[in-house]
Image (cartoon, rainbow, N blue to C red):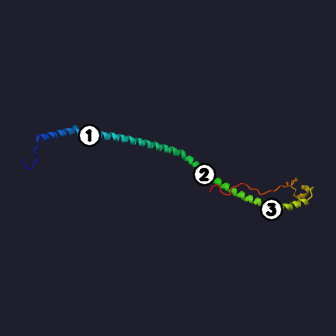
């Protein structure tokens, strides 16, 4: 043999074993290839199972999104109406507080007038006692002030008691 050839002499048994091993690998028989096939089958089943789980989760998420959107569509108008009612209630409360303040002011002025009338009462009673009882309204009102010809008698005297107090709140309803 020449020196450039790298051939080695191998026993026939080794060559036979190598050929058998190659044929087994080609046909897929033997313990190592069966384990590999089983592992691939198991892996495939697990991947199929995982794929089904992801598909189910995707469907659940889509259904939840649809449900959330339906609920949002129903709640939004209600929330808007509640906000409008809240704004209206605030305006009404401010109006009630303003009316209360005006009434308290007017009642204070009315009470001052009543107190002034009470202080004038004795002098008016003295003047009334001095007037004769048989004088009619025609004698008191001069003819030039009598427009239309009908005379209205003066209103009857009223009994003036304590100042009128109404139960209004002094503090606003809403802070």
Question: Do the residues bearing badges 1 and 3 touch, measured as CB atoms within 8 Å?
Answer: no
Q: CA distance from mark 1 to mark 2?
A: 73 Å
Q: Position of residue 63 (x, y in %)?
A: 46, 42
What residue sits 75% from the left and 60% below the top? 109
Give the residue furthest to the front.
Answer: 162
Q: CA distance from mark 1 to mark 3?
A: 116 Å
Marks counted in the figure total: 3
**Height in image: 120 above or below 2?**
below
Q: Position of residue 58 (x, y in %)?
A: 42, 43
Q: Secondary structure at mark 1?
A: helix
Q: Position of residue 21 (x, y in %)?
A: 18, 40
Q: Is residue 166 left or right of residue 117?
A: left
Which quarter of the rendered picture does the C terminus lie within?
bottom right
What residue sits 34% from the left and 41% below the top? 46
Give the mark, 1 or 3, whose residue is nearer the N terminus.
Answer: 1
In the depicted view, which residue is nearer to us: 131 or 126?
Answer: 126
Residue 27, image quadrant: top left
Q: Which label was assigned to residue 149? A: none
Q: Secondary structure at mark 3?
A: helix
Give the mark, 3 or 2, whose residue is nearer the N terminus.
Answer: 2
**Height in image: 175 above or below 38?**
below
Residue 52, image quadrant: top left
Q: Secondary structure at mark 2?
A: helix
Badge 2 density bin: few <14, some 14–19, many ≥20, Cα 10 Å: few
The residue identified by callout 3 is: 116
What residue sits 71% from the left and 58% below the top? 102
What residue sits 27% from the left and 39% below the top? 37
Q: Position of residue 166 (x, y in %)?
A: 73, 55
The residue identified by callout 1 is: 35
Badge 3 density bin: few <14, some 14–19, many ≥20, Cα 10 Å: few
The residue identified by callout 2 is: 86
Give the mark, 1 or 2, whose residue is nearer the N terminus.
Answer: 1
């Amino acid at each position: 043999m020449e020196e450039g050839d790298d051939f080695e002499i191998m026993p026939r048994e080794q060559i036979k074993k190598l050929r058998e091993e190659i044929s087994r690998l080609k046909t897929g028989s033997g313990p190592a290839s069966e384990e590999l096939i089983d592992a691939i089958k198991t892996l495939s089943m697990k991947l199929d199972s995982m794929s089904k789980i992801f598909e189910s989760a995707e469907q659940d998420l889509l259904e939840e999104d649809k449900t959330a959107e339906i609920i949002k569509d129903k709640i939004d108008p209600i929330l808007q109406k509640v906000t409008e009612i809240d704004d209206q209630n605030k305006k009404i409360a401010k109006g009630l507080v303003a009316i209360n303040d005006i009434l308290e002011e007017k009642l204070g002025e009315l009470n001052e007038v009543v107190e002034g009338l009470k202080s004038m009462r004795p002098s008016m009673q003295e003047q009334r006692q001095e007037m004769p009882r048989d004088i009619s309204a025609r004698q008191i009102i001069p003819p030039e002030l009598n427009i239309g010809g009908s005379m209205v008698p003066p209103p009857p005297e009223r009994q003036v008691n304590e100042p009128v107090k109404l139960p209004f709140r002094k503090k606003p309803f809403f802070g």
